[in-house]
Amino acid sequence: MTDEYEHFEAVVVGAGPGGAAAAATLAEQGVETLVLERGVDAGSKNVSGGLIYAEKSASYTIDSVFDGFREEASERPVSEYYIHNLAGGKVKTLDLSTIHHHDTEWCDAVLRRKMDSWLAERVHEKCSETGGGLLTDVRVNGLLREDGDIVGVTCDEIDPIRADVILAADGVNSELAREAGLMDWDDPDEWFQGVKAVVDMDPDAIDERFGVDPDDGVAHLFSGDLFEGVRGGGFLYTNEDSLSIGTVFHLDSLAERRAEPHELLDALLTHPLLDRWLDGEYEEREYAAKLVPDSKKAANPSPHRGRLLLVGDAAGQMQAQGPIIKGMNHAVTAGGLAAEAFIEARTRGDTDVAGDLYERKLVDEGVMAKLRPRRYRMTRRLSENRLATKVAGCLVDSLLGRTGMKLLDGVVERAFNSPFLLGMVPDTRTSYVTVPRVLGETLGERIEAENDIEPPDLADRIGGLTYDVGDPHIELLDESHEASGTAVTACPVSAEDFGGGCYRSETVERNGDTRQVVSLDTQPCVECGTCAVVADTHWEHPAGGNGVEFRDG
Amino acid sequence: MNTIVLTKGVPDFREGQVSFDEDGHLERGKTPTVMNPNDKHALRAALQTKVRHGGTVSLMSMGPPGYAEILREGMEDVYAEELYLLSDREMGAADTWATSMTISTGIEHLEEPPDLIFAGFKTADGETGHTGPQTEWCLSISDSLPDYPLISHVVAIDIDEDERVVRTKRLVEGDVSEIETVETELPAFIVADPEFEPTYRRAEYRLRHKELREETRTRAAEFGEYLDDDTDSDPTDWENFHMWGHEYLNLDPDFIGLDGSPTIVAGVDPIPKAPSEREATVVEADDGEGMENVFEELAPYAGGD
């Protein structure tokens, strides 16, 4: 019996691609590494749209860290990339292959449960050799401090652990990043919300309907008039024997318009354009949702404090610029760099400088420039100004704008394919709604098909997920409609006039007063974190092994 | 820290598995045999000891040769190394007394006396809860073994290896349930309560647990292959499996099995099924009048009240 805290050289929190890359890099250099994952299995808590890139310019890629990744863990490679601008029953399709292939060594579709659990096996093997390993079902719930300094982590299931370095790769809702004051949930405009359906499809049907070889795949993006004016878009990626179809919206726009995420997803699924691929058949395997940081605003330029280094979504390292969405690759690079930083610091005999070294590496290796492009910062003030947005919107919509678009057919495609121009695309309605709509209307071809598929309703979607939440992990601090009402619509598993979700609107009468309030039941929670931003809550993850379990992810 | 877990094969009483004849007697031949569900808690207690303190876990049972399958199942649960089956026609139809005599003799024949002996809380067929404590009593009169103080209803275990002390929490159920802390020196005999919960509060324990799981999977699969191999009818040539008869144990057949059992079962009264509280009428789909009655009965509820 010992009362001493356990000690590991490195503790990695979270077994996603960022944590996996960090742990593998550390272990290969003989650093005693313990990885703590709160899911029942790595990947069971993870959702992504589904494309992982390997960039030529990156110092670490997932297959450079993990041999055989593409053969074993990913779905189809994505060699073609299109965007469909939809308006008034018309579509203008642009080929974005140039921007897709820019700096790209390869890009594969992935399903996270399969991918992350494969990674976790490798990580455990590597870490075991150092005296560490990977544990699932353990939730790290805070930082262990000594005289105010961070010296380790505390957990629900096990006693506190001391470590020389803590790599928090615990995802977009990182509790460690928040406890350290490095991230917050304050501004809806720093976040996107993604919602996704994984749809069954026979591999032969995928080959035929998408016109791809059995070992090849394609990505389609969607924007225009199908999302009730909410800023964002849709995507469709081909997996081995399924499709990932989803939508990603700016959370502030979603909240402001009181839009229902699952309805916006349905708007995409039932759009006539999708008939060419779905062909009247629709078997939804899984419904999932996640919050996505917008690195342009949320990426922390100094993602460390003491022995704590943040990696991936936890540090806001998720790049979304126009049609290009890259997150997992940056997490992998950051994970590798954080590990490298610690190893260098250890060699110098001063592990406390790991954080500073990491910060420098993110800049030197070009990661920060991708996450927070200077061009965006410089043009943002002007282009996201309301008046400028209005003027630009009207201009594009005007006869002049439309004629211009016509003249520019071809140039538009080139513009969309320019990494330089995309770096300054403002997050306004003009970019997301007006331009695609006018493109569709002015240059589009009419869609003749009809799409009569019926996606499952929200109750069925929730019913299809596996849960064992245990004690409520979210506390509603202010139940008033003014403070927390937005959660009823913005939460992907809640809706107005729906009693089976997390958040519900209720009218209560007290002492003759009638008041609109919000009630919360955490049972159907998918742990996306939306309500942490749009409502007044105390938000934590469920204990290890509890809560939603994604089978595809 | 070397431990042994005592386990028994019992009829699988779960719905869909168990079969009774018209008089309500158990049809043993038609009902599959499984490990006594309560023994799983003893297995978990032994596993916690192995994970936290190392050493080996053995499993022991008394029964027909087919019980080897129960031991294989147990091996997967507790990552056991050695399996002991006390099996002999002379041991058949034993009551708890004769069983305890046999089992305690089996324990005497182990190479080294175990540090901890674990048993489950009563079996699903006999429901006596005697065999564990009686075995402990038999051990206490054994010349070749140290004393094994008995702690029953154990819900948590903590061992201090240096001091050779085991500290347990036991659940004492009366008008109110209480948790009692009982400490004793090793070796000891522990009966696990169904409320037993293992605790692994250190990462090293959980890492070791994971490592053992992988090791055991291979070992149990290997044993399973021996058992499934029809051409090799003698699984005892598998080095970790030991099947011992009364001669090997030097037990007088008059003191074991049916002959050694003072208990006489005078008769078995089936417990009648509780009468249904609801009335049921069977209506066939082609019975027009009957179906009309059904609709009339249901109609008042159709409004959703």
Image: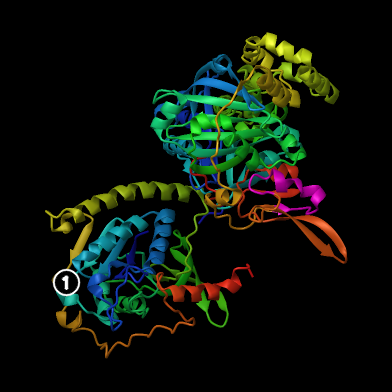
Identify the residue shown where x is 28% and y is 63%: B70
Asked if B285 appears above or below B176 in the picture, the reply is above
Quadrant of res A333: top right
Stretch of the chain drawn in magenta? A475-495
Which of A292 and A456 lies nearest the eye of the viewer?
A456
Badge 1 element: loop
Q: Where residue B188 sits in the image (x, y, percent)?
A: 39, 69
**What amino acid does circle 1 point to?**
Asp
Callout 1 crowding tier (Cα within 10 Å): few <14, some 14–19, many ≥20 = some
Q: Where residue A485 sits in the image (x, y, percent)?
A: 77, 49
Q: Where residue B280 sits in the image (x, y, percent)?
A: 45, 79
Residue B254 is one of the magenta-drawn residues: no
Question: Circle 1 marks a residue in which chain?
Answer: B
Q: Which residue is mark 1?
A: B88
Taking the image as shown, residue A358 lies to the left or right of residue B103, namely: right
Q: Would you say residue A174 is visible in this rendering?
A: no
